[in-house]
Amino acid sequence: MRHNLSDLREVIKDRRSIKPENFKPRKVLKDQISEILSNARWAPTHGMTEPWHFVVFQEEATKSLGEFMANAYKDKTSEEDFLQIKYDKFVNRPQLSSVIIAVCMKRQESEKIPEIEEIEAVACAVQNMHLTATAYGLGGYWSSGEIAYSDEMKAYLNLKDKDKCLGLFYVGYPSINWPTGHRKPLEYKTEWRTK
Ligand SMILES: Cc1cc2nc3c(=O)[nH]c(=O)nc-3n(C[C@H](O)[C@H](O)[C@H](O)COP(=O)(O)O)c2cc1C
């Protein structure tokens, strides 16, 4: 055994999505953010393309991000579908988090590696981020959706046409008891074959 399996299992099982509405105002330190992002880079990457790209929002930038998303939502939504409550959430939510990381996939110029594999690599990077946050006792929350995936967001993040924003990762100290999770037993999800 090279590592402590029981510690590893505990961190994996303890990782929880905790929404910014359940964060304390306490700031996440720059060193913690750097560690989270540094570990992200150790995700597997086909062809060593390292397709991840992170845009870190803090302080005033969280407010601007919220305003941008709210306006993008308003512009893209018809009057009959528009919900003020959703607009307000776009404005307010980012300010509840001392750090928000836009998680992006930068497409390789040659496009040799299939796009799905580049997205998969970045998703693995997000898991590394979330596990690292868990080790610090920080909640993480991967938020996706129409605005995160929009061309407007792509432009806001200075991404090129073939790049993708995979969502926003909010990190913060929870103000609630650490949530418990649940998963279906392995038998429901596994088929064993020997022949
Ligand atoms: C690609 C991806 C996108 C997600 N986007 C959202 C989202 O937009 N809103 C949300 O409430 N949760 C989102 N989640 C988080 C899931 O809701 C969460 O993982 C699930 O409820 C299980 O909870 P746990 O992470 O605490 O185990 C996303 C998860 C993944 C993998």
Image: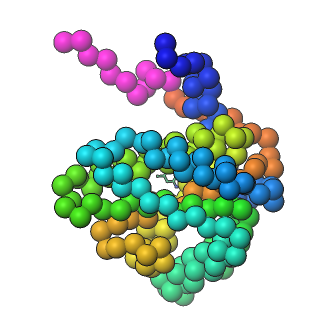
Residue 34's place in the image compared with 83, above or below, is: above
Residue beneath the point at 30% across and 68% down: 162
Q: Is residue 145 visible?
A: yes
**Residue 76 placement, left or right of 63:** left
- Give the prevailing secondary structure in the magenta stretch: loop
**Residue 130 placement, left or right of 110:** right
Residue beneath the point at 57% across and 76% down: 69
Q: Which residues are magenta?
A: 185-195
User: In this orientation, which residue lies closer to the viewer: 149 or 41?
Assistant: 41
Determine which quarter of the picture holds residue 135: top right
**Residue 17 placement, left or right of 50:** right
Q: How many marks?
A: 0
Residue 188: horizontal and vertical position, in percent? 43, 26
Residue 185: horizontal and vertical position, in percent? 50, 24
**Residue 142 placement, left or right of 161:** right
Residue 72's place in the image compared with 172, above or below, is: below
Colour mapping used in the image: rainbow
Determine which quarter of the picture holds residue 87: bottom right
Q: Is residue 80 visible?
A: no
Residue beneath the point at 57% across and 84% down: 71
Residue beneath the point at 49% across and 68% down: 148
Residue 146 in magenta stretch: no
Residue 134: horizontal and vertical position, in percent? 65, 40
Residue 43: horizontal and vertical position, in percent? 42, 42
Q: Identify the image quadrant of the C terminus.
A: top left
User: In this orientation, which residue lies closer to the viewer: 120 or 71?
Assistant: 120
